[in-house]
Amino acid sequence: MDHEVVRVGLVDDQRLVRAGFAMVLSSQPDLLVAWQAADGKEAVHMAQTQPVDVILMDIQMPVMNGIEAIRALRTNPAKIVVLTTFDADAYVIGALEHGASGFLLKDTEPEALIEAVRTVAAGDAVISPQATSTLLKHMRTSVPETASQRVPLKLIDPLTPREEEILVLMAKGLSNAEIARELYISMPTVKTHVGKVLAKTDSRDRVQAVLFAFRHGMVTQAELLRDHPRG
């Protein structure tokens, strides 16, 4: 995306909030706010008639809320980043499970917002530290306590041992660079493995792959607590 303009759609029922986001994003030569919508229903229509690369989506809106809009746009190629003042478990999990590629609170610094849009447009996922904490807290109650309780994977195209290893590290929150250092392999090799993991698990991005790993018990509670201690 270095030499391309990223087209962005803004969805929020507060006009001043939309104007603020638009001003921040429009200050960058590689970001273009293509349209703005005041509710989820309008956003779904705009996304279908005026395709964009990234949609910044509020959660609580009239007519159709953000979760419903994300669900309706699941087959749309646009990547969705949820922007909200709320970080309750239900919002985080609901947004991510229905296809959001990122989750940021509205008090995110302008620079972080700009970088998040670029990151998601480039194919990665982005979640605020608060949302990551909430996600892990939620998943601790649904992942197995020990490795013996892990659920066997049933995929048409099974993951190789290396791909399973990569997915587990992704689920623990490691970036591509951190995975490369952990396994002593090159970044291009990591990216190749990550791409295969996404394809084989039918995940549109890293967030969906992480949820897949959690649902199938590929990471234990002990491992999550060790890598992301409480408090």
Image: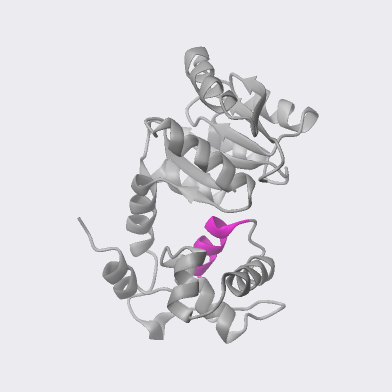
Does the magenta segment cover residue 84? Answer: no
Look at 42% across and 63% down and name the residue there: 173
Q: Magenta region: which residues?
A: 205-217
Instruction: Determine the main secondary structure of the stretch shown in magenta.
Output: helix
Rendered position, 120 above or below 139 = above
| Front residue of 32 and 210 | 32
**Left or right: residue 109 compared with residue 212:** left
The spot of residue 35 in percent (x, y) is 68, 22
The spot of residue 20 in percent (x, y) is 49, 19
The spot of residue 172 in percent (x, y) is 41, 67
Look at 31% across and 68% down and name the residue there: 227
**Left or right: residue 152 compared with residue 203:** left
Rendered-image quadrant of the C terminus: bottom left
Look at 32% across and 56% down and name the residue there: 137
Q: Looking at the rendering, which quadrant does residue 144 occupy?
A: bottom left
Does the magenta segment cover residue 216? Answer: yes
The spot of residue 154 in percent (x, y) is 63, 78
Extreme top residue here?
15
Q: Is residue 218 visible?
A: no
**Left or right: residue 151 compared with residue 189:** left
Rendered position, 222 above or below 70 = below
Extreme left residue here?
231
| Front residue of 180 and 58 | 180
Colour setting: one colour
Q: Looking at the rendering, which quadrant does residue 37 occupy?
A: top right
